Image (cartoon, rainbow, N blue to C red):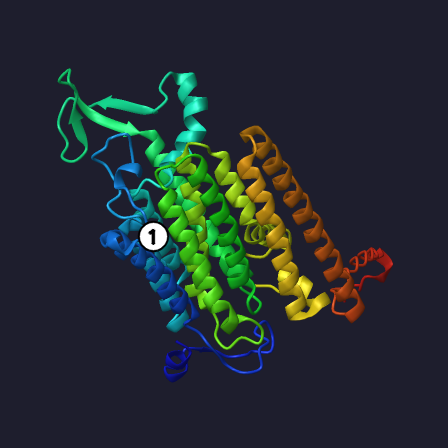
């Protein structure tokens, strides 16, 4: 991939500002990660298609989408997942090669989220949140509402046994789709934000994949849920892709992930986190988000910092977590420090997946409050430091001087007037 990128001029040139590498570095690292990730998924297909190999033990009846035994996964990982990964990869690749408007990038990410919605990845997350609360209060746990129309509308209406014609609104499905969209947009852009140092994103994503793999294996042993194989295969494929790419991406890097790789890693990680909700225990999703806490924290800090500074959220700066650590510890020191923080969050997330739901919710709430307080404090400190720097350099705008008071105009005396000739 490096040779292909150099031959076609798909490189990242240093600019002396935010791009501090000394030589042009090849892009297309994200394509290499994509091939490794999808290659692992396709290998699981072969293992299922040829059970005599003895690589994987697969019983499709043990992995049901619903209680209906006819609604089964034909493969360990649904095709919709590969479709979503492919769309994200292509969106990032086009942005790396020729550039893409932010609106089109968001549209591509939403299309990938729609592919996951087709597989109902976020439905169980919404069901776990809404059914025990609003659903029980309304006496309608499934939150399905029938709106009579009196006439048929193609593809929308259905007929009840009572011969009523109308539209069935499955509220949980639509809220689950919205959850998928928010999670995908947030994770893709959060991973993109922390991809600022050599080996940082690929290493922290590998740590997340390893921690999520432990959670997935624990769930498979304890519960044997419907998406156990999907979670385990995705975790192993993502972990293998990160470990295979990291030696080429670590400082000094010979190839960069680009937007293609950063968006792809965020999408793959949040996909695994969302599948944890299909166990019927929503607190496992919170545990997964704690494992993914470094990109979330950095994004929250960036949003608060730029908002308080009066900047747009899309305006780049050099005040991310990795930038602050790099100024104190250097590139490798900053990366290893964030690796350690990632391991700590991974261990906490694994522990939270084993605890009771109430404990998990309490810890998640404390962590959110901590991130909010730290975000505001760091943003205010940055404002003070910028103001001091401006005053010291003499570039601060002087305070406007008050306008002098207008002098009273003396009235003309009658004696001073010119006498008419």
| Depth order, front residue of 224/414 | 224
* Residue at the spot 40% in from the left edge and 42% down from the top edge: 275
Q: Is residue 322 above or below residue 23?
A: above
* Residue at the spot 50% in from the left edge and 79% down from the top edge: 13
Q: Quadrant of the C terminus?
A: bottom right
| Depth order, front residue of 325/380 | 325
User: Is residue 152 shown left or right of residue 324?
Assistant: left
Q: Quadrant of the N terminus?
A: bottom left
Position of residue 413 measured from the top left corner of the image (x, y, whole percent): 85, 56
> In this orientation, does residue 28 appear?
yes
* Residue at the spot 17% in from the left edge and 20% down from the top edge: 160
Secondary structure of residue under mark 1: helix
Position of residue 5 measured from the top left corner of the image (x, y, whole percent): 39, 78
Reading the image, the residue beneath label 1 is 112
> In this orientation, does residue 319 appear?
no
| Depth order, front residue of 271/91 | 271
Number of on-image labels: 1
């Amino acid at each position: 991939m490096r040779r292909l990128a150099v031959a076609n001029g798909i490189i990242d040139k240093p600019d002396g500002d935010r791009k501090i590498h000394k030589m042009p570095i090849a892009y297309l690292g994200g394509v290499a990660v994509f091939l490794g990730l999808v290659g692992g998924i396709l290998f699981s297909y072969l293992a299922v298609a040829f059970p005599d190999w003895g690589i994987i033990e697969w019983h499709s009846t043990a992995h049901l989408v619903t209680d209906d035994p006819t609604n089964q996964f034909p493969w360990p990982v649904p095709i919709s997942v590969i479709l979503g990964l492919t769309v994200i990869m292509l969106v990032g690749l086009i942005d790396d090669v020729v550039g893409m408007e932010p609106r089109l990038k968001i549209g591509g990410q939403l299309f990938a989220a729609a592919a996951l919605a087709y597989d109902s990845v976020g439905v169980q997350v919404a069901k776990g949140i809404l059914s025990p609360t609003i659903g029980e209060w309304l006496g309608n746990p499934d939150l399905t509402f029938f709106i009579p129309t009196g006439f048929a509308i193609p593809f929308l209406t259905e007929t009840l046994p009572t011969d009523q014609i109308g539209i069935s609104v499955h509220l949980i499905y639509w809220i689950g789709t919205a959850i998928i969209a928010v999670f995908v947009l947030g994770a893709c852009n959060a991973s993109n934000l922390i991809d600022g140092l050599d080996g940082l994103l690929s290493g922290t994503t590998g740590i997340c994949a390893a921690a999520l793999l432990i959670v997935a294996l624990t769930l498979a042993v304890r519960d044997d849920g419907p998406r156990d194989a999907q979670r385990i295969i995705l975790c192993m494929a993502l972990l293998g892709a990160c470990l295979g790419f990291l030696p080429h991406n670590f400082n000094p890097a010979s190839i960069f992930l680009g937007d293609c790789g950063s968006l792809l890693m965020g999408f793959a990680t949040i996909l695994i986190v969302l599948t944890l909700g299909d166990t019927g225990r929503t607190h496992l999703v919170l545990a997964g988000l704690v494992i993914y806490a470094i990109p979330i924290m950095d994004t929250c800090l960036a949003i608060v910092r730029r908002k308080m500074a009066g900047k747009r959220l899309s305006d780049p700066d050099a005040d991310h977590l990795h930038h602050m650590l790099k100024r104190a510890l250097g590139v490798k020191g900053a990366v290893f420090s964030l690796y350690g923080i990632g391991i700590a969050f991974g261990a906490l997330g694994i522990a939270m997946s084993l605890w009771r739901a109430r404990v998990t919710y309490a810890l998640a709430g404390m962590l959110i409050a901590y991130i909010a307080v730290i975000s505001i404090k760091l943003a205010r400190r940055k404002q003070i430091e910028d103001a001091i720097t401006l005053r010291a350099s003499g570039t601060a705008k002087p305070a406007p001087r008050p306008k002098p008071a207008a002098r009273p105009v003396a009235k003309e005396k009658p004696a001073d007037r010119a006498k008419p000739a």
